[in-house]
Amino acid sequence: MKYVAILLVVGVLVAGILGPQIFFVVDEKQVAIVTRFGDVQQQVTSPGLYAKTPFVDNVTYFEKRLMIFDAPPDSLLTKDKKRLIIDVYARGRIVDPKLFRETVRTESQAASRAVDIISSEMRAEIAGDNQAEIITTSREPIMNRILENSKPQLALFGIELVDVRIKRADFPAEIADSVYARMQAERQRKADKERAEGAEIDATVRAEVDRDATIIVANAEKNANILRGEGEAQAIQIFADAIGSDLDFYSFQRSLEAYQTIFAEKSTIVVPADSDLFQFLQSPEGLTKSDTAN
């Protein structure tokens, strides 16, 4: 039993030492190559457990997931001799680990080469388009052309380029203020024009309303004056007819109006006693002198 225990311990130690030298694991996020004295013996692109020659073979792992190649913002000259600040990035993955190791060796070196290629293609594309087109309509076609032109170059390093994106395309700081000032002035001009047109329409509408109101008031006053004149004419005619039919009543009414005026003023009037003014005050029956004589 003692020897069995010793053998088990020795076996575990040997397995612990030789196991990592014989077997290696590649997970789903990795690709790997097996090298022997610098020469590539095997490349592994699928996850699983693999064997190698112990103490002689070495395993190098690379990232299988998408890598980001982020280029720094760059000031580029457009076709119409204007400058834009372009910030671009790309995504790609290692599909040929052997070729990748033989050409760029490390992921950081691969990112540097990818950025150089993409930036070069970007400069060429920006130089072929006008500034306004790049900002408005040409961005998507430019990204597609950069992707297609860069793919074959990165394939030489065992990298598959998947996507190229322009994060932003801005005016340089030295001209951004003037551009924004022009944009603001243009918007202000349009706003002033619309306000002026609105004020003109408002004045026209108000003038039409005032004119219509003046016409309506004038017609109303005209009709009122006509009706008033007709009413006064009818009143005068009725009054004249009444006077013509009874002159004594008319004399009586005029005297009453005179009394009302005199007494309302509270004044003293000296007149002869036989004045016609007091004929209705002197006669209880309200008759004239001629009637009293009769």
Image (spheres, grey):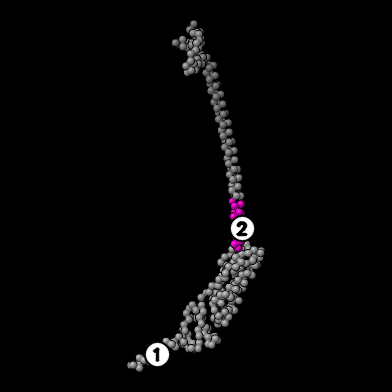
Instruction: Name the residue: 53% across, 23% down.
Output: 235
Q: Which of 280 and 129 is in front in this view?
A: 129
How many numbered marks, from 0 up?
A: 2
Magenta includes 178? Answer: yes
Instruction: Name the residue: 60% across, 73% down.
Output: 116
- Crowd class of label 2 (few under 14; some 14 to 19; many from 20; radius 10 Å): few
Residue 56, given in percent of the width and then of the height, sits at 50, 88
Q: Can residue 96 be seen in this view?
A: no
Left or right, residue 5 beside residue 68: left
Residue 162, given in percent of the width and then of the height, sits at 56, 73
Left or right, residue 59 beside residue 76: left
Relative vertical location of residue 49 with respect to residue 294 in this rendering, above or below: below
Magenta span of residues: 171-191
Q: Which of 237 and 147 is in front in this view?
A: 147
Type of the residue with mark 1: Gly
Residue 132, given in percent of the width and then of the height, sits at 62, 62
Query: Which callout, 1 or 2, points at the residue further toward the start of the chain?
Result: 1
Mark 1 sits on what residue? Answer: 11
Q: Magenta segment, principal secondary structure? A: helix
Type of the residue with mark 2: Ser
Q: In which quarter of the image is residue 167?
A: bottom right
Relative vertical location of residue 281 with respect to residue 8 in this rendering, above or below: above
Q: In which quarter of the image is residue 72?
A: bottom right
Mark 2 sits on what residue? Answer: 178
Residue 286, given in percent of the width and then of the height, sits at 47, 12
Spatial CA span between label 1 and label 2: 79 Å
- Helix, strand or loop status at disc 1: helix
Q: Quadrant of residue 100?
A: bottom right
- Comparing labels 1 and 2, the label whose residue is closer to the camera: 2
